[in-house]
Image (cartoon, rainbow, N blue to C red):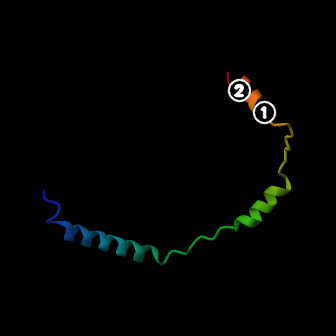
Amino acid sequence: MNIAKNMEAIFLAAVALASATSFATASTPVQRIDPPALTQAAADASMTVVTITGKRLTAAEKAALAG
């Protein structure tokens, strides 16, 4: 089974399969979806925003926690 001998046949079969698939799906209409901007704007209106404030640890405090 030397695949190098059959490479041309494999390539032609792949091209034929790709062509048949593209012609078969060419007549199907493209499905349209709502743009993400409209759905994102509706989600932002009811989204809860949480703000966390606090001081950063110093290098000594980080070392004490890690040690």
Where is residue 53 drawn, in percent x and y? 86, 40
Where residue 45 sits, quadrant-wise, is bottom right
Badge 1 or badge 2: first in the primary sequence: 1
The quadrant of the picture occupied by the N terminus is bottom left
Residue 16 lies, with reference to residue 48, above or below; the image says: below
Left or right of 20, for residue 12? left
Measured as percent of width and height from the top left, residue 11 is found at: 26, 70
Residue that sits furthest to the top in the current view = 67
Residue 31 falls in which quadrant of the image?
bottom right
Residue position for label 1: 58
Instruction: Categorize mark 2 by other alpha carbons within 10 Å: few (<14), some (14-19), many (20+).
Output: few
Above or below: residue 64 compared with residue 36: above
Which secondary structure, mark 1? Answer: loop
Q: Residue at x 30, y 74 (%)?
A: 16
* Residue 50 figure quarter: top right
Q: Residue at x 17, y 60 (%)?
A: 3
Q: Residues within 10 Å of mark 1 (few under 14, many from 20)?
A: few
Q: Are marks 1 and 2 in contact (CB under 8 Å)?
A: no
Query: Which mark is drawn over residue 18?
Result: none
